[in-house]
Amino acid sequence: MSGLTKHRGAAVLIAASSGRALAAAARRAGFRPLVADLFDDSDTRGLCAASLIAGDWRTGFSRDPLIAALETLAEANSPIGLVYGAGFEDRPSLLEELAARWSLFGNPADRLRRAKDPMALAALCQARGVPHPDISLALPDPCDGWLVKSVGGAGGSHVAPARASRPAGENVYFQRFAPGEPISVQCLCDGSRAISLGLSRQWTAPAPDEPFRYGGCVRPAGLAADLERRLADAACAIVGAQGLVGLNSVDFLVDGDIFHLIEVNPRPGAAIDIFEDGEGRLFQAHIDACLGRLPIRALEFNAASAAAIAYAQQDIGAMPQLDWPDWTADRQKPQSVVGLYDPLCTIKACAAQTSAARALVEARAGALVDAINCKLGGEAS
């Protein structure tokens, strides 16, 4: 019996900082998603059999609210297990508690902990001959050309020049700056082997205190075929050696023909929005890979796809009622309070070529922010 036949119509718990993308992927694969996240956006609710907010997005998940939300969701729905996304990289102990209650479709806590250990990753890259920037647990002197990062950080907001560092020892490490364009490899892993689903380009949306804040991504990356093969081989070698399962991604910086592996993201991430396959197989492929089964037939992705975050350009005391375009997701609820530089929503776009998809997603983001600012100005007058 195929995984899709076995699980079609089954309820599945989803826990992530934002659960909407995973919920959409689960729905396309025929599951009934039950989401506990930090936003409870209106479109997330529309995708789910049930959803609950489980904490504050500024501080992340904490034990009691998350477990209470998941237990409430599970009580009347008999889920087959739990899929997690972003939000647990720096709290593997919480993941251990979830795994004690529900079957986990994702990396167990010990593998997540090892994948996010900067010293372990650097040693593995060296052993496998994969280029990786120098790292240090002590503040380098001089520190020009170094970055400070949080252990278990995700999304770019935790990265800053080392001169703006928090004191060494406060769950941070230092990584030598590497030039290049951010490229990510999406991998599907069965615990020992890994296959590449494709590559994407990423970009930043800097804010005053967050120079490397995540901006968006676009697929395909459009690199030379040989370079894409080298990146995919390096990514699959590392995640295979780490024993990861399911959907994971590996981030690189690429400068011409030179690349450096920057970090591993041991869970499904924001890029699943642009890896929507035509048959809705992505979520099922994640579950099957967690059970040790990689797909026999490759997943197929049509045209080019981009997704970006639209950020607020002013403080919004009460989010206005909007007629959201269908190319938006993760939509702020009416009357919610949105701070300057907070996320407003995700913007999506598809086109025939990578450059056109990115241009379209950026144009849509600009138009939406302008429309919100105009509406706020009209309400204030």
Image (spheres, grey):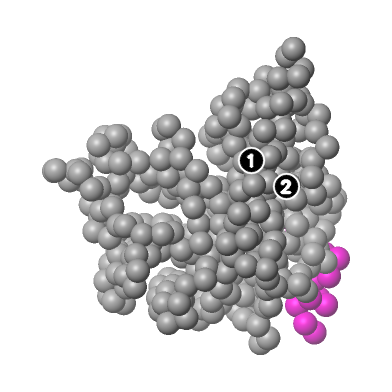
* Outermost residue, top side: 381
Give the x, y percent position of residue 236.
Answer: 46, 76
Residue for point 71% across, 50% down:
20
Note whether residue 314 is visible. yes
Q: Which mark is residue 106?
A: none
* Residue 269 seen anywhere in this rendered image of the structure: no
- Residue at 77% x, 82% y is 2
Q: Does residue 12 belong to the magenta stretch?
A: yes
In terms of sequence position, does the residue under pointer 2 or pointer 1 come before the other?
Answer: 2
Magenta segment range?
A: 1-15
Residue on which the image places disc 1: 366
- Tell me if mark 1 has few (under 14), some (14-19) or many (20+) residues whose alpha carbon lies within 10 angstroms of its own: some
Disc 2 versus disc 1: distance between alpha carbons?
A: 15 Å
Tell me where residue 347 appears, x and y as whole percent: 67, 48
- Mark 1, secondary structure of its residue: helix
Work out whether 179 lies above or below 191. above
Residue 236 painted magenta: no
Residue density around tag 2, few if under 14, some if 14–19, many if 20 or more, within 10 Å: many
For residue 370, which quarter of the picture? top right
Check the image and name the residue furthest to the left.
141
Q: Quadrant of the N terminus?
A: bottom right
Q: Nearer the viewer, residue 173 or 314?
A: 314
Residue toward you, 73 or 139 = 139
Q: Is residue 342 above or below residue 378?
A: below
* Vertical comparison of 42 with 276: above or below: above
Secondary structure type for disc 2: strand
Question: Residue type at mark 2?
Answer: Ala
Q: Residue at x 24, y 58 (%)?
A: 134
Left-right relation of 52 to 186 = right
Q: Which residue is mark 2?
A: 329
